[in-house]
Amino acid sequence: MKKSALQLARAAYQPKLPKSLRGDVCLKEGAATQSVADREEIKKLFPNTYGMPVLSFEASKKVRIYPAINVGVILSGGQAPGGHNVIAGLFDGLKRMNHDSRLFGFLLGPGGLVDHNYMELTPDIIDDYRNTGGFDIIGSGRTKLEKKEQFDKGLEILKKLDIKALVIIGGDDSNTNACVLAEYYKQINAGVQVIGCPKTIDGDLKNEMIECSFGFDTACKVYSEVIGNIERDCNSAKKYWHFIKLMGRSASHIALECALQTQPNVCLISEEVAAKQQTLDDIVNYIAGIVAARAADGNNFGTVLIPEGLIEFIPAMKKLIAELNDFLAANGDAFAAVERSQQIKYIVEHLSPENASIYSSLPETVARQLTLDRDPHGNVQVSLIETEKLLAEMVGRRLAAMKAEGKYVGKFSPQTHFFGYEGRCAAPSNFDADYCYSLGYTAALLIGEGKTGYMSSIRCTTRPAAEWIAGGVPVTMMMNMERRHGEMKPVIQKALVELDGVPFKYFAAHRERWARETSFIYPGPIQYFGPSEVCDRTTETLRLEHE
Ligand code: FBP
C-alpha cells in the first residue's frame, strides 16, 4: 500500500514510555477501594471484583519470568486517534514478557467476539499501523456486550483460541460492560481476565484516577487548527459569522477545549445551559446580542462554537423531544401516512400547547429532522440535528427583528460547519501516540500480573512521559447506579464539564472580552517533529486541571 511521506517518517517514531516501564517492573498495591457512590449495591453486583486496590508499576532490578499467553483485543465504539498504538503497546508488552505470547484481534467491535470473527495480529501487521490514526487494523463497532448469552458465546471462541485475557478499548459504556464481563468470567471460573482502556474523543471518561481518555488531545487539536483557520479567514474578509458545531454527544469538553485553544467570540457549554435552565430563545438572544455589539464596533464577523449535544441540554427542547419520541412511538404509522407537506402541521396539532409552540417556532429543516431521524430505541439522533443551522437561522431572524426596532445596525451573513469525523481518525499527536502506547503496554503488564476488572491507567500526564505513573484502577471504583432505559444499572459515571472546574472558570472569566474584541488564536496544525514545547504539549483542559 502506498504511504505518504509523513506516514513513512511517522512509522519510525518510537513512542515514549514512562521510565518505570522501560525495564523490569514490580507491582505496588494500594489500599482497598470503594465505588464513587452506591457502594452497597455495586458491591453486591460485583462480589468478585469489588474493592480491589489501585495498582502501580515501579522499575525493578529483579528479572521476572512470565509464561506465554494468548490475548484478545477489541476496539469498541467511535474511532479515536491512538487506538492502533494501544494495540502496538499491548503487543510489544506481551512480547517483552514472553516472546511466544500471541495477540488476536476481534473484528468490527464487540460483535467480532460474539460472532467469532477474528484475526491474529502478527509483527508485520502491527508494524504497518504504528503511530497511525483510525481503527482499521481490526475495525470497530457499537454492539453492546451485555447479555449472558453473548458472554457465553464469546467464551467459546476464547477457549478455542486458548485466549486467557481480553483487552476492551472503549468509552464509559464499553468499560462498564468490560467490568460486568470480568465479574462474570471470574464468577464462573472461566480463566479469562478482562482489562479496559479509556477511549473517546468526547473526553467524558475521566475521573480522579483516569486523567483523560485517549483521542481527545488529537481530535481537539485538529478541530482547533481548522477553527483557527476559519477565524483567520473571517478576520481577513470581515464579512461572515461562522457557526461551528463540534462532536461530543453528551459532554461539552471538546467545545470548551477548542475555545481555550482558539478564543472564539462565542462558545456554548451545554452543561451551563442546563444549569441555568436556559431556553432556545435565551441562547439566540445571547448570540444576537454579541453579534449586535460587535456590529456596533464595525465588526460584522465572528465565530460561534456549539457542542453537538446542546439541544438535549435545553430543558424545553428536552421536553419537546421526549413528547415527540412518545408520540411517534405510538403513532408512527399514522404519521408516515400523512402527506409530506402536511407533516409539520399534523405534529403541531397533536402536541401539548407548550411543545407545539416551540415546535412551530423551529426552522422547517430542523422540525423535520426532529420527527424523521430515530434510532432503533425510538430516540431522536441528536447528532443528526443541524443545531449550527438552527442557531444561525434563528439568530438571523432575531437580528432582523432587532433591526426593525432600531437595536441593530449591521450585516449578518452566516456560514455553518460541523467538525467531527475530520478529527476522529487523525494521526495521533505525540501525546496520544505516547499515552496510548503506554496504556497498551500497561494493559499487558496487568495481564502478566493476573489482574482482571481493571482499567489501564497512566497518571501525571502533564509531566514529561518519562515521569508518568503507570498502573491499574479497578473499574468498580468508578461506578455508581444510574437509571438506564427505565432500570437502575451499575455504570461508570460520565464526566460532564464541571462548572466549578478550572477550565470552565478560565473560559468564563475571559469570554466577555473574547466576544467583543477579536482575540482569536491560530493554533496551526499538529506538529510531529520539532521542539518539545510545540510537539508534546497537552490540551489546555489537562494543563488547567493539573497545574
Ligand atoms: P464514542 O463515545 O463511542 O467514543 O463516540 C463518540 C462520538 O465521536 C461522538 O462524539 C459522536 O456523537 C458519535 O461518536 C458519532 O458516532 P457515529 O459515527 O457512530 O454515529
Image: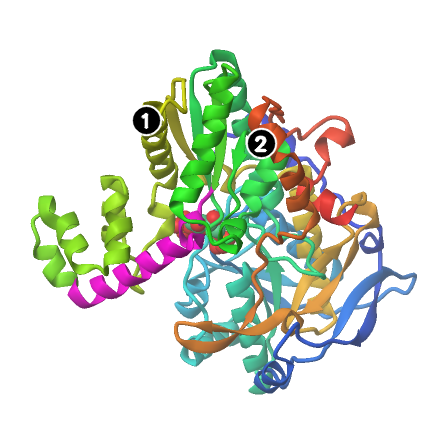
Q: Is residue 244 above or below residue 328?
A: above
Judging depth in this view, the residue of 18 and 411 nearest the camera is 411
Three-letter code for the amino acid on which mark 1 is drawn: Ala
Q: Secondary structure at mark 1?
A: helix
Which quadrant of the figure contains the C terminus? top right
Q: Which residue is mark 2?
A: 7
Judging depth in this view, the residue of 144 and 59 nearest the camera is 144
Q: Is residue 337 above or below residue 489?
A: above
Is mark 1 in CB contact (under 8 Å) with mark 2? no
Locate residue 68, reporting x and y percent: 69, 68
Locate residue 259, reporting x and y percent: 58, 36
Q: Does residue 539 appear anywhere in the picture?
A: no
Task: Determine the CA span between mark 1 and mark 2.
Answer: 50 Å
Q: Give the magenta part as a residue range.
A: 307-331
Judging depth in this view, the residue of 364 and 15 nearest the camera is 364
Q: Does residue 396 appear anywhere in the picture?
A: yes
Instruction: Indicate which disc, 1 or 2, sits on the residue closer to the N terminus.
Output: 2
Three-letter code for the amino acid on which mark 2 is drawn: Gln
**Could you tell me what secondary structure mostly forms the magenta stretch?**
helix
Binning the other alpha carbons within 10 Å of mark 2 as few (below 14), some (14 to 19) or many (20 upward) gives some
Residue at 28% across / 56% down in the picture?
Answer: 354
Quarter of the image for residue 526 reads: top right
In this picture, residue 175 sits left or right of residue 404: right
In this picture, residue 195 sits left or right of residue 65: left
Q: Secondary structure at mark 2?
A: helix
Q: Which residue is mark 1?
A: 400
Residue at 61% across / 64% down in the picture?
Answer: 196
Q: Residue 281 in magenta?
A: no
Q: Residue 310 in magenta?
A: yes
